[in-house]
Amino acid sequence: MNEVFKLTENISFTLGDALLELIYVIASVLFIIGLKMLSSPKTAKRGNLWAALGMVMAIIATISLHEMDGEPIKNIGWIIGAIALGTVIGWAIAVKVKMTAMPQLVSFFNGMGGASAALISLMEFPHLAHGSALVAMHTGEVLAILLGLMIGSVSFAGSMIAFGKLDGRIKDIRASALRVINLIFLAVLIGFIVYIMTRGEASPAELMPAIYLMLAISLIYGVSFVMPIGGADMPVVISLLNSFTGVAAAMGGFLYDNQAMLTGGILVGSAGTILTILMCRAMNRSLTNVILGAFGGGGAAAGQEGGTVKEISLSDAAVLLNYSQKIYIIPGYGLAVAQAQHLVNEMSKMLERNGVEVKFGIHSVAGRMPGHMNVLLAEADVPYEKLIEERDASEEMSSTDVAVVIGANDVVNPAAEEDPSSPIYGMPIIRAGQAKNIIVMKRGMGKGYAAIENSLFYNDKTRMLFGNAKDSLQKLIEEIKAL
């Protein structure tokens, strides 16, 4: 009879373990389906829910089924309490945040993910050994812990700096010496990993000072590599930090042999890496320079532009737009600030009913995060097929009657192509200057996020329509109706 009980217990454990693995596989599939659906605005919301369902399943299964040495997870009350508290706080923040603050929110949440991965490494390294036992340091488990610590810490510190800069709390610090300093930090961190993993059999407790030093240097490196980056380059950095967090989470998946965590981390890490590479290519940047924080041309901001700024009245702008054949609207952060995405869609529909072809030129780094304009215009139900990427939009610009620049500055600045000393030199732009007419909607003559002058504003074909974008569009719509 005792043998039967033992066999039953063994079968029960095996079934529970198998069920846990099965749920992890299902969760992983849901992550992949969710990521696939996020590729289209029409399915993005459902994709988000599918991925969230996968995460909920993985969490519940882990809490209820995971065992170590035959012992179930303890402190379940604390775990559920922490999850509930985090859920409430996250929900409240996400509901209240404005669209203009979405990049800051992404940076903040990304930083929390990096911090979590670093804390996992920090907590698990001493637990490699029980008591004073020696542990082999040249194992994959140790490597996963060290990489998780380094990458997670860099992601956390970098994301917090990115949050501060996006929120206008931290200014850029550009110094050529930072490139060398960052390279040294990176070499030192790799040196720490090599040092720890070549200790042979050692006590984790004795190596904790090295772990703490590695944590401190990683945090400093995260700060120093984001500090020089500013202006239009910030979306690339956010994408890179996002990939860092994914890789750090994947290290946790390796460490715990958790397939759901591993899959989720790999998906985030690979998606963020691919996006970063694509954005680097789109902006003519080197990925190495991104990692070392050596963005931009390195020169000082462009000096003051000469020339005369010409204004256009609302009635003249309405006539020009209404009797054009083809219009390109180029949105930027100013549109998001004014929350004018619904009005710009209303105006585009009105012009289309009057026989005008309307398209939206979307620069990949317009706004403050990757896809910022896509999200903003999707919220206003602007058809996705009307959103044209910068390269294709530039090719059509010479056949465009009016380029309407709304709150965008750096992404249409000719200095990116004409001024080698400009911090944005080398970044592809939407060549709005090639359009037959240009209307620029701005609140004033203030500079964009890169803090440099824009010669487009002094172009003979350019007319400025000053004012808040929301007010200007509302009045423009009324003028077009009256025609």
Image (cartoon, grey):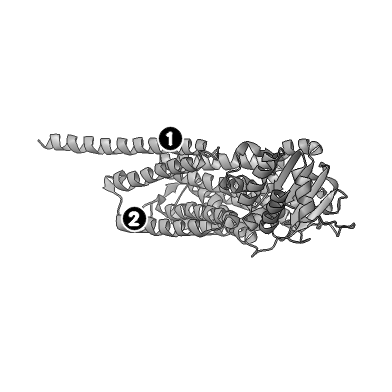
Q: Identify which residue, 181 or 477, lies in the foreground.
A: 477
Residue type, mark 1 in image: Val
Q: Please state the horizontal and vertical placement of residue 394, each as a whole percent of the image.
A: 76, 39
Q: Identify which residue, 67 or 275, lies in the foreground.
A: 275
Q: CA separation, marks 2 and 1?
A: 25 Å
Q: Mark 2 sits on what residue?
A: 80
Q: Which mark is residue 160?
A: none
Where does the N terminus fall, quadrant-wise? top left
Q: Please state the horizontal and vertical placement of residue 97, each as a whole percent of the image.
A: 53, 58
Q: Mark 1 sits on what residue?
A: 29
Callout 2–callout 1 Cβ contact below 8 Å: no
Residue type, mark 2 in image: Ile
Q: Is residue 246 left or right of residue 296?
A: left
- Disc 1 element: helix
Q: Identify which residue, 36 or 26, lies in the foreground.
A: 36
Sort mark 1 into few (<14), some (14-19) or many (20+) by Cα contacts within 10 Å: some
Q: Identify which residue, 483 or 335, lies in the foreground.
A: 483
- Res. 134 visible in picture: yes
- Disc 2 element: helix
Sort mark 2 into few (<14), some (14-19) or many (20+) by Cα contacts within 10 Å: few
